[in-house]
Amino acid sequence: MIKKNFPIVAFFATFFAIAQTPCENGIAAGYPCDGYALQSHISLSQMSASGGNDSWGWTDPQDGKEYALIGLDNGTAFIDISDPVNPVYLGKLPTHTSASIWRDVKVYSNHAFIVSEAGGHGMQVFDLTRLRNVANPPETFTEDAHYGDIGGVHNIVINEETGYAYSVGGDDYNGGPHFIDISDPLNPTHVGGYADEGYSHDAQVIVYDGPDSDYTGHEIYFGSHASHVSIIDVTDKNNPQLIKSFLYPSTGYTHQNWLTEDRKYMLLGDEGDEFDFGFNTRTVVFDLTDLDNPILHHEYYSETSSVDHNGYVVGDKYILANYSSGLRIVDISDIENGNMAPDGYFDSYPANNNANYAGSWNVYPFFESGNIPISGGNGFTLAIDQTLLGNNDINYNLEFSIYPNPANSRLSISSITNPLTNVEIYNLLGQRVLDLKFSETTSEEINISSLNSGIYLVKINNLTTKKLIVK
């Protein structure tokens, strides 16, 4: 959210007030919807908070259980969603200093890293494996480590491949990225920063594997800087190099960007253009085939006038937190030809779809189960593609786990008790693309480098089927 001025009760750990409801005739439990159903909801008051903001997710590699991490004005909530219809609010890590509407959380190596614009907040580190054994939820948690080389900052970005975090929107480096080595999560270390592009609001940082071979294997920072976009090579933390800084038409507030999985296109959300120019929700698409020469590819306008906030790409879907119009799904399968189209929604703010800052702040679309947490002014809302409703084999069998997910070239499959015997992988056309046999092992790592990017179904021991996203 743009920086602007804005004007202990005990609860049961599991909440039943609003639970699983399919989308029928465009409504699910009072929420407007199209193709997406309600799994469950936990209000801000049930989490003893008065405001909600960002969110992220964690999948426990030990048993495959999924947890939603929800930013609140006064701390960070942890919710066990392994039973998505009956989520368990495990408790809250209080803010390090004071309350703030701005809080952000990301995950690396089974630890949560949390920042806030609250004065002197720094970065909290929380060991997520502690969530495995919460005896009397909701608990009040304590941080496991604290990084004090930053104060209040707007956001945190993590590259899980390299073990570096980038805090942005702080008081140093002109508000640009502050580099932190988190490879040892409980001992974060300051390793540099970049000031030349000024204030950075949000970013995506990757080990580059896209079409521009000049930068293959480099760590690249794709940043939204309020007034422009930057591409920075941050491979050498002592000597980061600007690749390109660029503008686009009708700039309101350059808020957040995400790349397509082939790295050819950047989808950019501007948080101010709906106010400044009267647009419907606009997504600005750049062709990044040549990182030194970004080209404006096209602009996509949605069917509502609400303000876009955070968006992510999963396969051929752009999954967006769209403030007053909630979770929005956009089909980008034909993005190369400048075609994007609405592909479903779940509106967690039924009051209106106007340009305002009410409603959905963030969505987290990377869970294997397909469950999508929505966070913001309505607290915690859990939605899912309606085609996955009731398919417990795909979503919730915890005997077997697959990790990581999304995956690239290697996939680990584990069983809690029974040996693995057979793993089959199918594409969405129902074609079997891998068929592997095992004996007397409860864990296997398999090579999936032959699979194209997309969504697959992994059938394990003819007992359960899990959804796999291949990057």
Image (cartoon, rainbow, N blue to C red):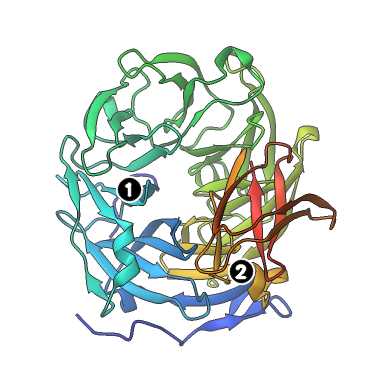
Decide if residue 330 is on the left or right side of residue 324: right
Res 26 label = none
The image shows residue 48 at horizontal and vertical percentages of: 27, 74
Q: Residue furthest front?
A: 440
Residue 366 visible within the image:
no
Query: Please, is residue 154 above or below residue 420 in the view?
Result: above
Q: Which residue is mark 1?
A: 4
Decide if residue 432 is on the left or right side of residue 376: right
Decide: few, some or many residues near mark 1? Use Cα within 10 Å; few <14, some 14-19, many ≥20: few
Q: Residue at x 66, y 55 (%)?
A: 438
Q: Which residue is mark 2?
A: 395
Residue nearest the viewer, comparing 250 with 31: 31
At label 2, the amino acid type is Asn
**For residue 147, which quarter of the picture?**
top left
Decide: few, some or many residues near mark 2? Use Cα within 10 Å; few <14, some 14-19, many ≥20: many
Residue nearest the viewer, comparing 247 with 346: 346
- Please tell me whether mark 2 or mark 1 is closer to you in this view: 2
Decide if residue 438 is on the left or right side of residue 204: right
At label 1, the amino acid type is Lys
